[in-house]
Amino acid sequence: MKPLILITNDDGYDAKGIGVLTRVARQFGDVVVMAPSCNASGLAHSFTSARPLRVRCINEEPGCVVYACDGTPVDCVKVAVEHFCHQRPQLLLSGINHGSNASINVLYSGTMGAVIEAAVMGIDAIGFSILDHSADADFEPSVPWIRTIIADVLDNGLPDEVSLNVNFPIPADGVIKGMKLCRQSHARWADSYEKRIDPQGRPYFWLTGRFECDDKNEGTDQWALENGFVSIVPIKADHTDFQSLDTLEKRFR
């Protein structure tokens, strides 16, 4: 029996990146695509609880069916696994995201929210992102690496509750040098809400900000990407800081 691969994203079912990922995934098995009906970037691990979800079929052909859901990426995973997959997915793929999900971005990413949800459900999961926000980003240099990573995970699996956050660079010479297993670099978004006035004289606030990262040492995802390598960071939903347990236990005993 062919493996079933579930695919989602946060850019919407009609984004170029998810089309490329679907094309590659179909080389490995049957595919179910369940993605947001519109852009759902930045929704992290949010899900819908205050209204019903609607799902519509966009396209169906042998070995591949595409659905659009009017919820979040996490909604897409939950609903697809329960109601739209003819067998339990062996693998969840999310992306290819238009824009980086390296470093602190993993906390805000709807792309990675879906990946973490699948891992919690016991499904091997990989999130793919590229450092290009343009709608017409060139994904083709990344395709051989995507194929390699998918093949490895299908053959060997992942540790329990571990998923992969994969980011692709945009090298100046167009050549990706290789892959690096990395740790997440320490960084932050310095956010600011700019106050503006609408035509009716009412104030509103518009999010702005800049990415700040001083942790670009070799071994981090930011170093890998800035040096032309694919970064692969294994992640878990468990946020426990085990190094602090003993110290804090003594304080709060």
Image (cartoon, grey):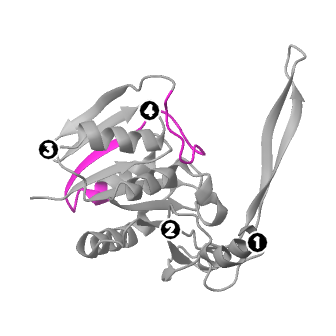
Q: Earlier in the sequence, mark 2 or mark 3?
A: 3
Q: Would you identify the image quadrant in which residue 201 lies?
A: top right
Tag 3: residue type? Pro
Q: Are marks 2 and 1 in contact (CB under 8 Å)?
A: no
Q: Which residues are magenta?
A: 23-49
- 44 w.r.t. 3: above or below: above
- Decide if residue 172 is in sight here: no
Q: CA distance from mark 2 to mark 3?
A: 34 Å
Q: Name the quadrant of the N terminus.
A: bottom left
* Towards the viewer: 199 or 162: 162
Q: Are marks 2 and 4 in contact (CB under 8 Å)?
A: no
Measuring 45% from the left and 44% from the top, which residue is drawn there? 74
Tag 2: residue type? Ile
Q: CA distance from mark 2 to mark 1?
A: 29 Å
Q: Earlier in the sequence, mark 3 or mark 1?
A: 3
Q: Earlier in the sequence, mark 2 or mark 1?
A: 2
- Examine the structure image and report whether residue 42 is included in the region drawn in magenta: yes
Q: Which mark is residue 37?
A: 4
Measuring 46% from the left and 33% from the top, which residue is drawn there? 71
- 79 w.r.t. 95: above or below: above
Q: Earlier in the sequence, mark 2 or mark 4?
A: 4
What secondary structure predominates along the stretch shown in magenta? loop
Select label 2 or label 1 by which is in front. Answer: 1
Q: Are marks 1 and 4 in contact (CB under 8 Å)?
A: no
* Other residues around mark 1 within 10 Å, as few (<14) / some (14–19) / many (≥20): few
Mark 2, residue position? 235
